[in-house]
Amino acid sequence: MKPQQIAIPVRDPMTGLRVWSLAFVAVLLLMLQTVAARALPESFADLADKISPSVVNITTSTVVAQSTGPQGVVPEGSPFEDFFRQFREREGEGNRARRTSALGSGFVISEDGYVVTNNHVIEGSDRITIEFFSGEELAAEVIGTDPKTDIALLKVEADKPLPYVSFGDSDTARVGDWVIAMGNPLGQGFSVSAGIVSARNRALSGTYDDYIQTDAAINRGNSGGPLFNLDGDVIGVNTAILSPNGGSIGIGFSMASNVVTRVVDQLRDFGETRRGWLGVRLQPITDDMAEALGLSSTAGALVADVPDGPAADAGIQAGDVIVTFDGEDVADIRDLTRQVGATEVGKTVRVVVNRGGETQTILVTLGRREEAEGTIPAVAQAPEVEEPAEKSLLGLTIAPLTDEMRSGMGLGATVDGLVITDIDDTSQAYEKGLRAGDLITEAGQQKITSIADFEEQIAAAEEAGRKSLLLLIRRDGNPRFVALALDAE
């Protein structure tokens, strides 16, 4: 009997190696997919449950006088006649006072009832009501406001400790990080939207701008609401959107928490802001300036003028280039302005300047910016300058708001600004939704009451090297920001 032969397959050793390699790659890919899946939150529900009780809806109201119309006030054929007629038709007849309302958002930052929101949410109101997630409503008083950063601090009195949220470090937020926004969009009540940090350190037109840009949906009514990171910390206050129609297109801006916390602390302690003041007029350094000054880069801020103030007292001169302030490098004018504004009034700081190709360290004791601004007369106040009745700027024909216009438009006596009397249909302003009858109350985050104020903000933006000017527009009592290019026509 022949022994049974068993066929033993002969395997190529390289084949076995390839099999093990493929298996290893498959396992590695599976692990990577698992890690990626863990990086994406399956739901924001737990976080929303945690932070919702601290987010509030804000309703503001004010009493305005109702007029029967512009008879005897606006001449026949006036450019105001058409939109005054529209106001009369919409509001009806009568000569009685009425109360108008506006909506916004905010959030509680302490158990004893301090609430943060935007200044433009509560500006001009005589009654502020805070609605909590539970449905409870409390009246609020204004502790202080800061139009420059558009921040307001309110206070409510409750009979129990309130749920609150804390500020996080906005400087740690990175482009691409998850964020969620909460608020009261379009008056629909509490709402959550999610997105990512789209960009950092955005500047719109304010002196102290440091905005976080996000694609989380932000709409009218979200103003003053918080922007959270995934730890439930507030890293921004939702303030503005860029939009051609007033609705969200995924470009929203939240004032960075590291700016807000300094403002809030001062409002809580003093009821007002107290910013450092260096006392110099600056201009940006261009490539040709850097070459002429013998600088290796355009970093720093060129001193164009030194009026009476701390810098002049300390010996800073026109033509100096400020390269460091209080131990921090100065990137540009905006950077220096924010550093100075965030420094304690009365503090003596080291300012390093480049003068004639050599560096010098100068000790400067800072003054207070608010006091300094109050001593500078505005050009528009000169008695010999006559304010024009209207003027065309940036595609808009604007005119100062008068008492007669306030009556015709149903506005309160405390409301000021410029009325858009006409608009170029081919202009960027028209494309972005501005219309005749809209009221411009701020330009460059500064209140404006005259055409000269508006021109001054345009000049300031151009001098600072900005490409656009941020306007605060009010229509039917609802505010929104619109950025217009400075070369827009």
Image (tube, rainbow, N blue to C red):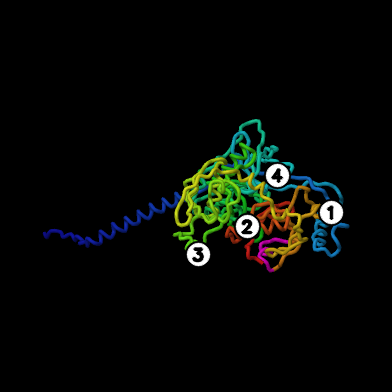
The residue where tag 4 is placed is: 59
Residue 304 magenta: no
Secondary structure of the residue carrying tag 1 is loop
* Residue 110 to residue 315: above or below: above
Q: Which residue is drawn at 73% across and 44% down?
A: 125
How far, Cα to Cα, is label 1 from label 2? Answer: 42 Å
Mark 3, Cα crowd under 10 Å, few <14 / some 14-19 / many 20+, is: few
Secondary structure of the residue carrying tag 4 is strand
The residue where tag 3 is placed is: 288
Q: Which of 96 and 290 is in front in this view?
A: 290
Mark 4 vs mark 2: in front = 2
The answer to whether mark 2 and mark 3 are in CB contact below 8 A is: no
Q: Residue 92 carries which label?
A: 1
The residue where tag 2 is placed is: 460
Mark 2 vs mark 3: in front = 3
Magenta stretch bounds: 426-435
